[in-house]
Image: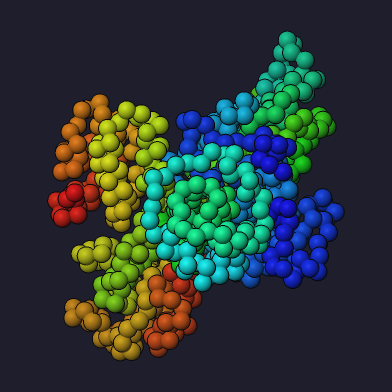
């Protein structure tokens, strides 16, 4: 069977999103198997953006569920607004006997009820309670759930393509992991990073690109840094450098606009100490 | 014949064995594929049937696009669920496919041709099509055939053995499942990728990073309701509203908070100096956990005597008896140190290496008191377990449960702290 007659929608990356073959294989395995894709990686490696680009490439709608530390699994399915109903019961203008009008669909509920296949992004699942992923297991497996208050069953009309991201703030339960396709986005190597920069700044001068890359990886290599700068910070930094019309020689000699890359006061001090020493020479 | 349908060696082909598909409709399985599963399990990757069938399903649907590189990525995505085990997977993969290398004498003969380079052109996809779906064994056979016909060096092109071509043999070329002959492996053959072992640093039994430590420490929690009542108690609200004849009566409750108190004590200076940075990282991880009710980090040198310090430069001290008096016995105590010292430093009355630290009490007694008071105490040792033969290490380990300062060790230690609670 050759690649162009595969029985599922294939993701091949987009002009703006550069994905390595490992990530493409994982995305396509997840789509083909109908299993959720769990993407892990350092902050700023493009996990959330990936969902947007899969949606764009496959021409599907994206539904995002931003998980918070207080999120409960059920909120993703639906919420029964009992307080509203209770309040309405005091007045005559609404039919409080109709429980269905007090059901508010969550992102998962909307994805299941959609008339066409959608992409469902469950963003930063590790922010929630440890039990949160387990509570979603059955719904993601069987793609259906019951609305207890009405006795209705909601079944996915089209199995959504589910993408889950995690910053590894918490470990995820084993049973949950077993059901996912997994991909870890490693921090981009130099060559991939320069491709990424070229996408964002197509007209960047080669010397500037090289000088910033050198500085960036030098910074990331410093062990004493508490928070290493990520891709998005590098892109911000380059934008500032271009706007400020900074000379390439200046980047080689010092670190202008260090604040765009390093955010913690102690890290700034550490970097300055290193810059004064030999380590900072280019 | 597809790459996955083919047997790994001639013998099994003659036997004509072909494992049947399972009930779930996975593709017909060949003996070497199941060998691959057990090769992974032998390396400590606990692949379960559910994951294996997912993997077979993905192969059947053509996700791997009939290349060994695709096979590698799809297997990793479906069978390995943490970056900490990517390295084990790489090892198992490289080990399993190692015997698919061309015979060494051929490799040597070709090495000479491959020495020179030519400008790199990406091949057209059509020229790759001829070679897609070749069995690996077939690939090796064709490689030898091609080599036999070839009698000069060859760069570029799509048929002969040489550099940067699209034929599946040679070096730095582009072919989905090609055979690489020597060189540094720019051509990204799957086994080569596995052999690069890029994820060595992510192993949980070797390394420790701040984030991972934070994850492990986060398990230490004990939620109780306290603080200002600012959470709506729905059930009570409904009850009270009913009693109130339908006029809404809101009832509030206090939110749940973590009540864990933790003291971290770290050995600095002396034999611990090589681990200072590691301990510093552990400290930063623990300090970031602001949700603890109480967190304190203290320092000591070599062994805990009658005083410990609030800073690593030994400026602000706190008396150990004061520490015991100030903190509830439920407070969890984590001590980080190598526990490695002279016998006298632990057991004699004035054992401290610090001249001003002549407390008159042996370190062992102070540790005993700490262990008696803080019922939930653990000792994290940065030395690997096999280096724990030192007498003071086992003496301290008898008083306070000792764990390795690795991610696995910290996870065990946290479990021990929770059990004790």
A135 vs A128, left or right, is right
Question: Residue at point 54% right, 35% down?
Answer: A13
Residue B320 lies, in percent from the top left, at: 32, 71
| Figure check: B368 above or below B81 | below
| Figure check: B262 above or below A69 | below
A124 vs B310, left or right, is right
| Figure check: B396 above or below A111 | below
> Front-most of B363 and B13?
B13
Residue A264 lies, in percent from the top left, at: 29, 44
Question: Residue at point 70% right, 38% down?
Answer: A6
| Figure check: B150 above or below A148 | below
| Scheme by which the image is coloured | rainbow
**For residue B18, what is the image quadrant?**
bottom right
Could you tell me if residue B270 is visible in this image?
yes
- Location of the C terminus of chain B by quadrant is bottom right
> Front-most of B331 and A70?
A70
**For residue B139, what is the image quadrant?**
bottom right
Could you tell me if residue B331 is visible in this image?
no
Question: Residue at point 63% right, 26% down?
Answer: A60
Residue A101 lies, in percent from the top left, at: 74, 20
Question: Residue at point 50% right, 47% down?
Answer: B157
User: From this viewpoint, which residue is outermost toward the top?
Assistant: A93
**For residue B115, what is the image quadrant?**
bottom left
Residue B312 lies, in percent from the top left, at: 25, 64
> Front-most of B156 and A239?
B156
């Amino acid at each position: 069977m050759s690649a162009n007659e595969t029985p599922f929608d294939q993701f091949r990356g987009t002009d703006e999103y550069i994905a390595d073959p490992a990530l493409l294989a994982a995305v396509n395995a997840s789509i083909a198997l109908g299993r959720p894709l769990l993407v892990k990686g350092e902050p700023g490696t493009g996990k959330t953006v990936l969902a947007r680009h899969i949606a764009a490439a496959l021409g599907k709608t994206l539904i995002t569920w931003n998980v918070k530390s207080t999120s409960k699994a059920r909120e993703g399915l639906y919420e029964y607004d009992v307080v509203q109903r209770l309040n309405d019961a005091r007045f005559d203008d609404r039919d409080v006997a109709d429980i269905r009008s007090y059901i508010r669909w969550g992102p998962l509920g909307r994805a299941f009820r959609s008339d066409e296949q959608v992409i469902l992004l469950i963003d930063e699942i590790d922010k929630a309670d440890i039990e949160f992923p387990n509570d979603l297991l059955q719904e993601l497996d069987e793609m259906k759930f019951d609305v207890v208050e009405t006795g209705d069953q909601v079944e996915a009309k089209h199995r959504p393509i589910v993408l889950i991201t995690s910053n590894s703030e918490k470990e995820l339960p084993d049973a949950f992991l077993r059901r996912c396709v997994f991909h870890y986005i490693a921090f981009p190597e130099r060559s991939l990073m320069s491709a990424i920069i070229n996408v964002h700044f197509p007209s960047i001068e080669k010397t500037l690109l090289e000088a910033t890359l050198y500085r960036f990886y030098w910074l990331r290599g410093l062990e004493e840094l508490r928070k290493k700068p990520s891709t998005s910070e590098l892109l911000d930094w380059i934008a500032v450098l271009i706007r400020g019309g900074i000379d390439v020689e200046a980047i080689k000699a010092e670190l202008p606009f260090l604040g765009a890359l390093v955010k913690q006061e102690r890290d700034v001090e550490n970097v300055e100490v290193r810059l004064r020493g030999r380590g900072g020479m280019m | 014949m597809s790459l996955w349908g083919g047997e790994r060696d001639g013998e099994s082909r003659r036997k004509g064995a072909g494992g049947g598909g399972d009930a779930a409709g996975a593709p017909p399985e060949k003996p070497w594929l199941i060998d691959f599963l057990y090769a992974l399990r032998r390396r400590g990757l606990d692949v379960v049937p559910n994951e294996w069938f997912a993997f077979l399903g993905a192969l059947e649907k053509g996700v791997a696009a009939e290349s060994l590189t695709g096979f590698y990525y799809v297997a990793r995505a479906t069978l390995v669920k943490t970056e900490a085990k990517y390295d084990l997977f790489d090892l198992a993969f490289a080990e399993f496919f190692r015997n698919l290398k061309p015979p060494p004498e051929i490799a040597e003969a070709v090495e000479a041709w491959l020495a020179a380079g030519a400008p790199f052109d990406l091949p057209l996809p059509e020229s790759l099509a001829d070679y897609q779906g070749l069995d690996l064994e077939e690939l090796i056979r064709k490689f030898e055939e091609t080599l036999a016909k070839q009698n000069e060096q060859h760069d570029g092109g799509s048929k002969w053995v040489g550099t940067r071509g699209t034929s599946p043999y040679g070096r730095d070329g582009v072919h989905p499942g090609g055979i690489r002959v020597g060189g540094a492996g720019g051509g990204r053959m799957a086994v080569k990728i596995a052999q690069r072992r890029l994820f060595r640093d992510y192993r949980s039994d070797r390394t420790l990073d701040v984030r991972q430590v934070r994850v492990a420490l986060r398990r230490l929690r004990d939620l109780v309701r306290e603080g200002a009542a600012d959470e709506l108690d729905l059930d009570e609200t409904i009850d009270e509203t009913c009693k109130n004849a339908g006029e809404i009566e809101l009832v509030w409750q206090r939110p749940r908070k973590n009540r864990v108190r933790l003291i971290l004590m770290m050995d600095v200076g002396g034999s611990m100096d090589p681990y200072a940075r590691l301990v510093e990282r552990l400290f930063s991880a623990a300090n970031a956990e602001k949700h603890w009710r109480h967190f304190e980090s203290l320092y000591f040198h070599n062994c805990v005597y009658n005083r410990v310090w609030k800073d690593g430069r030994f400026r602000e001290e706190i008396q150990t008896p004061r520490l015991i008096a100030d903190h509830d016995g439920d407070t969890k105590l984590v001590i980080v140190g190598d526990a490695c010292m002279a016998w006298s430093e632990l057991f004699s009355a004035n054992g401290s290496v610090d001249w001003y630290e002549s407390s008159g009490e042996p370190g062992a007694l102070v540790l005993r008191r700490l262990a008696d008071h803080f019922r939930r105490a653990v000792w994290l040792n940065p030395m690997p377990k096999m280096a724990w033969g030192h007498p003071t290490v086992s003496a301290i380990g008898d008083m306070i449960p000792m764990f390795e300062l690795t991610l696995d060790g910290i996870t065990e230690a946290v479990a021990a702290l929770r059990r004790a609670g």
